[in-house]
Image (cartoon, rainbow, N blue to C red):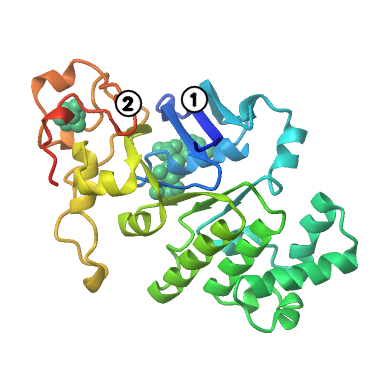
């Protein structure tokens, strides 16, 4: 039986804006099991990063408001933890890497200084032990000449090398969960594949759960056991990745699959979903996908479709009409 590590339970959160409240996340519920890789996919602005930031306690406190729900981590609700306790968990049990490693690194400190700092602070290592440990971590993430990299500054490294350094930094305290938010988008395809392989190997080696946020369903197919599809702040579909990709139940998931770039002709798409994600400050009181949906009927304007199902879940009143393809 898989053991739950993190459970999002009906999370809703919003931001204040001049146009009104931006409902960035609504009624989001999903579980990440110990050691599991879960993919979160959806178009830009659908609430993927904000969901991750809420788990890390990194939402901007003045602008963001939790409207309801819980994020349970080992039985405690992260949303109600004191900031000092949350800071202890972050970088220790919970870690995150971003699309742009440069923004997370300090340009005036060497890689070594930055890698040693959490080892000294969170793990109580002596500076000498931390230096040796950090050098090992650099080697573990597949970088050669670790000693010389320790004395280098971030601008002296390539994007792929920096992302490996970020992974080393995230792994340094052996987190139970690593969130990777578009970790390879800024990298070329060969380096992308190497970084993904590194993440997968490290997650396996350390029984670490991975929450992988991406636009790329190909990455999800390759990496994640479970996929969560977000649209306009809500989960519209989730389930075991192979099942969801083989037999999507929600028209939005079908659209994302149809809009996948062709791997052999990288950037080319045969199809893109018409229209745009609606303004989250002015969401309709019915299915947010209505305007873009090929299957929409008048009944879809009756209310917000609930997310129903057990292992497979979808939020579409017509999802039972979608025939299995297998
Ligand atoms: N600090 C903020 N203040 C106001 N609104 C915000 C803030 N941060 C995020 N939002 C809004 O929350 C919504 C969800 O944003 P989020 O960054 O989670 O999207 P995303 O799915 O990660 O998109 P992308 O794929 O582009 O990274 C967006 O409409 C965004 O404008
Ligand atoms: S509820 Fe209706 S509009 Fe919404 S996704 Fe399903 S068919 Fe489309
Ligand atoms: Mg994002």
Q: Is mark 2 on a helix, strand or loop?
A: loop
Mark toward the start of the polypeptide (2 vs 1): 1
Q: Is any part of residue 115 visible from this angle?
A: yes
Percent across and percent down for residue 195 are 49, 68
Whole-number angstrom distance, CA of label 2 to CA of label 1: 24 Å
User: Furthest residue to the front?
Assistant: 1
Residue 236, above or below 128 = above
Looking at the image, residue 247 lies above or below residue 281: below
Left or right relative to 305: residue 109: right
Q: Position of residue 18 (x, y in %)?
A: 44, 28
Mark 1 CB near ligand 1 (8 Å cut)? no
Q: At which x and y percent is residue 198?
A: 53, 67
In front: label 2 or label 1: 1
Residue at mark 2: 282
Category of crowding for the residue at label 1, using alpha-carbon neighbours closer than 10 angstroms: few (below 14), some (14–19), many (at least 20): some
* Closer to the camera in the image, 43 or 77: 77
Instruction: Tell me, for residue 9, which label it has, or none.
Output: 1
Residue, x 62% and y 56% (percent of image)?
A: 206
Residue in view at x 44 percent, y 50 percent? 213
The quarter of the displayed image where residue 293 is located = top left
Label total for image: 2
Instruction: Give coordinates of residue 43: x percent, y percent.
Output: 32, 46
Residue 260 image-quadrant placement: bottom left
Label 1: element kind:
strand
The residue lying at 69 percent from left, 49 percent from top is 91
* Residue displayed at 53% across by 72% down: 159
Asked if 197 appears above or below 306 in the picture, the reply is below
């Amino acid at each position: 039986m898989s053991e739950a590590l993190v459970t999002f339970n009906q999370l809703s959160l919003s931001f204040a804006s001049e146009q009104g409240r931006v409902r960035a996340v609504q009624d989001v519920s999903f579980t990440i099991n110990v050691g599991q890789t879960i993919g979160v996919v959806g178009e830009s602005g659908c609430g993927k990063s904000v969901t991750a930031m809420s788990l890390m306690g990194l939402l901007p406190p003045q602008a963001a408001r939790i409207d309801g729900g819980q994020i349970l981590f080992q039985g405690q609700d992260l949303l109600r933890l004191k900031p000092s306790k949350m800071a202890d968990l972050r970088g220790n049990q919970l870690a995150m890497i971003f699309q742009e490693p440069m923004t997370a690194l300090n340009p005036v400190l060497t890689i070594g200084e930055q890698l040693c700092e959490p080892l000294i602070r969170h793990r109580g290592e002596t500076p000498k032990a931390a230096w040796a440990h950090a050098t090992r971590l650099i080697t573990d993430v597949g970088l050669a000449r670790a000693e010389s990299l320790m004395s280098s500054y971030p601008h002296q490294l390539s994007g792929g090398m920096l992302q490996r350094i970020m992974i080393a930094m995230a792994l340094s305290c052996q987190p139970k969960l690593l969130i990777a938010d578009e970790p390879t988008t800024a990298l070329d395809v060969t380096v992308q594949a190497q970084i993904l392989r590194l993440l997968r190997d490290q997650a396996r080696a350390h029984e670490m759960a991975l929450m992988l946020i991406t636009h790329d369903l190909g990455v999800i197919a390759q990496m994640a056991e479970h996929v969560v599809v977000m649209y306009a702040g809500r989960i519209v579909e989730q389930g075991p990745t192979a099942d969801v990709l083989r037999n999507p139940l929600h028209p939005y998931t079908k659209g994302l699959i149809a809009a996948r770039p062709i791997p052999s002709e990288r950037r080319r798409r045969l199809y893109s979903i018409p229209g745009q994600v609606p303004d989250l400050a002015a969401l309709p009181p019915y299915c947010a996908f209505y305007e873009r949906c090929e299957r929409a009927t008048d009944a879809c304007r009756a209310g917000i479709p609930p997310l129903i199902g057990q292992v497979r879940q979808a939020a579409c009143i017509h999802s039972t009409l979608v025939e299995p393809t297998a």
